[in-house]
Amino acid sequence: MKVENITSNKGNKIANQFIITDEDNGHNYFQSYNSIIVKKYVGQTQQHTFLDKKYWNYSNTTGKYRNIFLGETIKDTKAKIKSGEYILTDLNK
């Protein structure tokens, strides 16, 4: 498992914003402070993205770095939740 800080557009490491990569099972996570915000699974034939139902849009800071992690805007994320492409669930049990 590998943990690294998210990097800003200027190349600076951002405190308390992490990308966690579990190469053994193909999962990537975005963690903001102590909460998992996004869990992505990328397999050879399928991909699944889960957002924490409580924290996915918790604050402007969380949203900013979630957008960077997902590579999209909040509008895109909301559309994918509505279509069922992204699944809201409890990632912080």
Image (cartoon, helix red, strand yellow):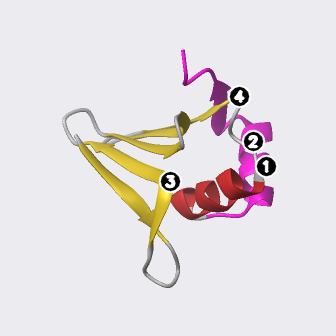
Q: Separation of disc 3 and disc 1 at Cα?
A: 24 Å
Position above or below: 74 against 40: below
Q: Which SS class for mark 2? A: loop
Q: Separation of disc 1 and disc 4 at Cα?
A: 15 Å
Q: Three-letter amino acid code at disc 2?
A: Tyr
Position above or below: 34 against 30: above
Q: Which residue is mark 4?
A: 53
Place residue 64 in its image quadrant. bottom right
Earlier in the chain: of badge 1 and badge 4, it is: 4
Q: Is residue 30 magenta?
A: no
Q: Which residue is mark 2?
A: 58
In the drawing, what numbered circle is on residue 52? none
Residue 57 percent across, percent down from the top left: 75, 44
In the drawing, what numbered circle is on residue 17? 3
Pair 3/4: label in front: 3
Q: Three-letter amino acid code at disc 4?
A: Lys
In the drawing, what numbered circle is on residue 79? 1
Residues in magenta?
A: 72-93
Question: Which residue occupies the foreground of this view, 13 or 82?
Answer: 13
